[in-house]
Image (cartoon, rainbow, N blue to C red):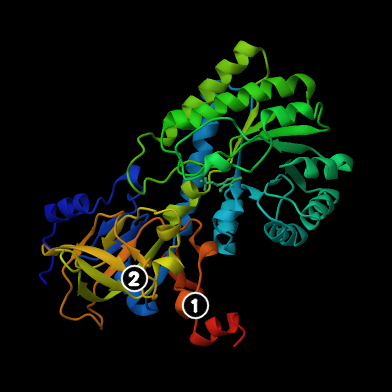
Amino acid sequence: MKKGKKGNGHKNLKKFWKLGIRDFNTHYFDINANDHLTVKEGNYQYDLIQLVKKYGSPTEIFFPYILEERLEELINLFNSYIKISRYPGKFFYHYPMKVNQNKEFILPLVTEGANLETGSANELRLVQKMWNRGNLNKKIKVLCNGPKTKEYLDLITELKKQNLDIIPIIEDTHEYNYLAKYRGNVGIRLDVDARVSSHWDRTVDRFGLSEQEIKRLGKIKNLKVLHYHIGSQIETLSDILKPIRKSMEVYAQLKKINPSLDTLDIGGGMPIPYDRKYKYSVDTLIKDIIKFISHFCEKNSITPPNIACEWGRYIVAPAQVTIYRVICEKEIAKSKRKWYVIDGSFMNDLLDTWAIHQKWHVVPANYMNSRQRVQTWLAGMSCDSDDKYTGQQSYVLLPQLPEETEGEDSLYLAIFDSGAYQDALASHHCLLSSPVKLLANNAEIKIIRRKETADDVARLFGW
Ligand SMILES: Cc1ncc(COP(=O)(O)O)c(C=O)c1O
C-alpha cells in the first residue's frame, strides 16, 4: 500500500476519519507521517501502532490526562456559570465508581477534585481502603447509592463514625427504617415521573421511591440530598431538563417540611457522541440547568440548592482506546461486504456492543491513507454468532487488508471511547484472555494489566 500524501492530504484524511473534532471527542487524535493513528498529549504524540507492536494486541490504552482534562473542564464550567449568574449554591462532582473501578482511573479523578459515588458495599470498601490509609482528605464527600445490604449499611455507619463525609441515599422503605437511628445526613432517591429517551428501561424502573411514597414518609430526619438518576446517554437537552423540572417540584415540597434539604443530585446521563445523534454541548446544558433552577427557586421563593452530578460515561469513556488486529477476512454470502475477524472479542471486551447495541467510532490505526476501502462487519473470536459489530446493521469502512495479515504489517483498528463500563462487564467466553491494558502519560508507557495467560483464565474456573 502506498504511503500517505502529507500536508493537505492529511487534513482531508483527518476529516474523513472524523478526527480532530472536539464535539466528537476526537480532538486528541491525529495521523502521522507513517499514516498511523496518534494520540496527542500537549506537543507529544503516541503512535498507537508502535505501542501495539511493542506490547501486543488486543490492547487497551488508557490516557489519564484525558480524564483529568475532562473533569477539570466540567468543574470549571459549572463554577464559572455559578459565578456569572450569581447562583448562591455550590457544585459537587461525584464520580460514579461503577463506571470504571480501576485504581488507575479513580485516583487521577480524586486528585483532580472528584467526590465519589458508590453503588455497592464492595465499591465502598475501596473508599474505606483509601480513607484508612489517609489518602483522602477530609473535604471529600461520598454518596452511597444502590440497594443496601446490612453489610453496606453497617459499613456506611462505620465510616460515618470515622468522620468521613458520607451520605446514604435511601432507595426504599427498608433502608429508611434501618437508617432511623443513623446519626448523619441522608439523601433520598426519587423515582422521577418523567419519560426520556435513553439507555434505561423506564417501563419497569425499580429504583428509588415515587413522589407519593416520599410524601407518605413525612419529615425525614437529617434529609440533605434529593437524588434521581433517570438514564444513560440522554440524547436531547429537553430530556435532561425535564426530570430536573419534575424533581425541583418535589424538592420545593420536601423543603417545606425538611429545612435541612439543600442539595439536588441529578445523577448520571450526560452522553458520549458514539453515534453522533445528540446535538447539544455541555456548555449549553450547564448554563440551562443553572438558569432553570434559579428561575424556579425565585418563582417559588426557595433557596437554590447545591447541585451535584454523577456523570460517569461522559468523563471516562474518551480516556481509553481499544486496538485489535484483523486476523483474516471472509466473504459474506450475497453481500459485497466482508467479515474482518479480529484477535479479540466484542462479547468479552466491549460487551455494550451486544448488551445495548452501542455504536462505536472505529478507525484504522494504520494504512489510514489507503484509498482501497472495504465495507466490513467485524467478527469477534468467540464461537458466538452475536460476537460481532456491524455498525448497527450498517457497516464499518476500513482499508482493504494488506497481503500480510500475520506479522508487523497487519491491519489494526482502533475503537474509541471504550473507557466506561466495559471492564466491569468483561467476560471470558471461550476462555479468551482479556487484553493487555497500558497507561500512557507524560510520554511514558506503563503496563497496568498484563494480557491474561491461558493459566490465568483457567484459574478463574478452578483449574
Ligand atoms: C445512580 C447512578 N449514578 C450515575 C450513573 C452514571 O451514569 P452515566 O455513566 O450514564 O453518566 C449511573 C449509571 O448507571 C447510576 O446508576
Frontmost residue, 21 versus 210: 210
Query: Residue tagged by mark 1?
Result: 450
Q: Amino acid at mark 2?
A: Tyr
Estimate the x, y position of residue 146 in percent, counting from the top left: 67, 49
Q: Nearer the viewer, mark 2 or mark 1?
A: 2
Tell whether label 1 touches label 2 (CB within 8 Å). no
Q: Secondary structure at mark 1?
A: loop
The mark found on residue 372 in the picture is none
Q: In the drawing, does residue 299 fall left or right of residue 232?
A: right
Q: Nearer the viewer, residue 85 or 169?
A: 169
Q: Residues within 10 Å of mark 1 (few under 14, many from 20)?
A: few
Quadrant of the rendered structure where residue 174 is?
A: top right
Measure how far apart labels 2 and 1 are at the Cα level: 16 Å
Q: Position of residue 84 (x, y in %)?
A: 51, 23
Residue denoted by label 2? 324
Residue 98 screen position, x and y as percent: 59, 55
Residue depicted at 45% across the width and 39% down the height: 234
Residue 253, picture quadrant:
top right
Eyeballing the image, is 79 above or below 124? Answer: above
**Outermost residue toward the right in this view:** 181
Side (left or right) of 126 relative to 63: right
Of the numbered discs 2 and 1, the one sitting upstream in the chain is 2
Q: Amino acid at mark 1?
A: Arg
